[in-house]
Amino acid sequence: MTALRIILGDRLSEQISSLDGADPQQDIILMCEVTAEATYVKHHKKKLAFIFSAMRHFAEELQAKGYQVDYIRLDQDAPLHSFTEAIEQIFATHKLDHIITTEPGEYRVLMEQQSWAETFDLPVFIRPDTRFLCNHAEFERWSAGRKSLRMEYFYRDMRKKFAVLMEGDQPVGGQWNFDNENRKSPQPSFDVPDTYHSAPDAVTRDVLHLVETQFADHMGDTSQFHFAVTAAQARAALAQFIEERLPYFGDFQDAMIQGKPWMYHAHIGLYLNVGLLLPLDCITAAEQAYRDQKAPLNAVEGFIRQILGWREFVRGIYWQKMPDYAELNFFEAKRALPAFYWDADTKMNCMHQSVTETAQNAYAHHIQRLMVLGNFALLAGIDPRQVNDWFLSVYADAFEWVELPNVTGMALFADGGLLASKPYASGGTYINKMSNYCKGCSYKVNQKSGPDACPFNYLYWDFLDRNREKLGNNHRVGMMYKVYDRMADDKKQAIYYDSSAFLMGLDAKTNTG
Ligand code: DLZ
Ligand code: SF4
C-alpha cells in the first residue's frame, strides 16, 4: 500500500502525525508552495519568506534521511494554485492507494482536506495534530457544562497534568499565577539584548528573491531577514532567549520602548507554530532555568503560561467554535480598517511605532498588538473581519487557530465574552504608563478633550457610551459607567463631539489621526 503523505507549511516536524509509520522506500511525501495560501490574505513578505524557506529546509532534511519528497515550488514555470491542484499533479505520475495528512491549523483547510476523498476517490486519513498538549476530546471534556471558559482554570489543570512547576499537588511558590508582578514600567535606558539572528543561506536567498518578485505588493520588505529557518536554528533562538531575556521577561512583559521592538519577549511563536520547536521542549527549558536559579519564578511562570495555558486554550476554543466564531461581531462594528494600519501614516505615535515595527519585522510584541493596535480597533469600532485579516497577514507567527481567538475574543471582545471577562479597552493613560511613546506624540496624553487631546482618551468613554446596552450589565465594566455617569454634561458632550469628529475623519480618510 503506497501512501501520499502531505505536510503543510506549518507542520514542519519529524514528529508530525502524517509521518507516523512512513515507509521511506514506498511512500511519497508532498510539500507544496501554492498561490492560494500565499494570497488568501496578503501575507507579509517576511512571513512568506520564513514559511517557504523553512519548508524547503525541512524537505531537504527529510530527503537526506531517505524519504521521497515531492516538493512543488512557486518559482517553477507554472506555479500551482491550491493543495488540491498539487495532489492532482502527483496523481498524474504516481500510483497511490491513500492519502495521509495531519489536521490543519485552519478550518478552511480542513474543509479542503475533507473534500479530497470524493475528489480523488481514495481513502483520506486526517490524523490529529499530536504536537498540541491538549487534544480535542480533552478540551471538550474540560469545557463541558462550564458557563464561561477561563484560561486560568484550564491552565492549572494542564500544570497538574504535565507536572510543570509543581511541588506535589501545589504550585511552586504557592501561587499559580504571578501576573501582578509582571507590569513594571519600562526604562528607556535599558540595554535590551538583540533578538536571534541567522544569516540567510542560499535556500533563503532564493526564497527572498521569489517573494520580492512574485509578492511585491505585500506589506514589508525582505531586507535584514534574520529568522531561524531550521529546527536547529530555532533551538538556538530558544536557548538565546532563555539565557539573555527570560530573566527580565516577566517584569517587563507589558513594557514598550520606542525603537526597541523585541524587548524581553521570546520571539519563538513563529517557530512553535510551524513545528520547528515543540511546546514541551520550550516549557522544560524554561522550568530548568528556574530550577538552576537562572531566571525568577514570575518570568518562568509567565512564559510557561503562554505555552501550556493560553496557546492550548485558544486552540481548543477555535476548534470548538468554528466556523461560527469567525463571523462574530458582538458590537456590530462596521468601520473600515484605516489605511494607517498599512502605511503607519498617523500622528498617533503609539500606532505609528507599532505599525512601523510590524512592517519592518513581521512582528510586534503582545502588548503592542493588544493594548495599542487591538485596543484602537476596539475603541474605533473597526469591523472584526478586517481586523482579523490584518493580524493574520502581517505577523509571521499568525495562523488562524491562534490569531482568530486572540483578535476576535481577546482584543475585540467580538465574541461577547466567551474568552475574556471584559473588553480590553483602555485610554491613553495606560499606554503612557507602559511606554515612552506619548513623549514623542503630537497628541497630549494628559488632555481629555480638544484637538490636541489623545484620541484614546475620548474614544474610550465614547466606546463605553456607544455600547452601554451591551456592556451595562457587565459587572467588571460597571464601575467605569459610574465614573462616566458622574461626569459633568459639558465633559460628556466634549467626548461625544471629539469622538464623532475623529471617527468621521477616519471614515473620510482626510484626518487619519
Ligand atoms: C501561511 C502559508 C503560506 C503563506 N503558504 C503556504 C504554502 O505555500 N504551502 C503550505 O503548505 N502552507 C502554507 N501556509 C500555511 C497554510 O496557509 C495554512 O495556514 C496551514 O496549512 C494550516 O494548517
Ligand atoms: Fe498614543 Fe495617545 Fe500616547 Fe499619542 S498620546 S502615543 S495617541 S496614547
Image (spheres, rainbow, N blue to C red):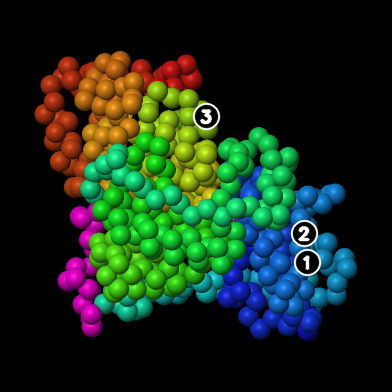
The disc at residue 72 is 2
User: Seen from this angle, which residue lies furthest right?
Assistant: 93
281 or 130: which is nearer to us? 281
Quadrant location of the C terminus?
A: top left
With respect to residue 504, does 416 lie above or below?
below
Residue drawn at point x = 52 percent, y = 39 percent: 360
Residue, disc 3: 343
**Nearer to me, 246 or 443:** 246
Mark-to-mark CA distance, 2 and 3: 33 Å
Q: Secondary structure at mark 2?
A: strand
Answer yes or no: do the residues labelled 1 and 2 have beta carbons within 8 Å? Answer: yes
Residue in view at x 62 percent, y 55 percent = 51
The amino acid type, in three-letter code, at marker 1 is Asp
Q: Earlier in the sequence, mark 1 or mark 3?
A: 1
Kindly state the secondary structure of the residue where label 1 is placed.
strand
Q: Count the labels in the image.
A: 3
Residue 172 lies in the magenta-colored region: yes
Kindly indicate the quadrant of the structure image that contains residue 57: bottom right
Q: Which quadrant, please, contains the N terminus?
A: bottom right
**Image quadrant of ligand 2?**
top left
What is the crowding at mark 2: few (fewer than 14 residues within 10 Å), some, or many (at least 20)?
some
Residue on which the image places disc 1: 70
Mark 3 is on which residue type? Asp
Q: Which mark is residue 429?
A: none
**Is the residue marked by circle 1 packed among few (<14), some (14-19), or many (20+) residues within 10 Å?**
some
How dense is the environment of label 3, judged by Cα within 10 Å: few (below 14), some, or many (20 and up)? some
Viewer can see residue 436: yes
Q: Is residue 305 visible?
A: no
* Label 1 within 8 A of ligand 1 by Cβ: no
Residue located 67% across and 55% down the image: 201
Q: In this orientation, which residue lies closer to the viewer: 412 or 133?
A: 133
Residue positioned 49% across, 40% down in the render: 358
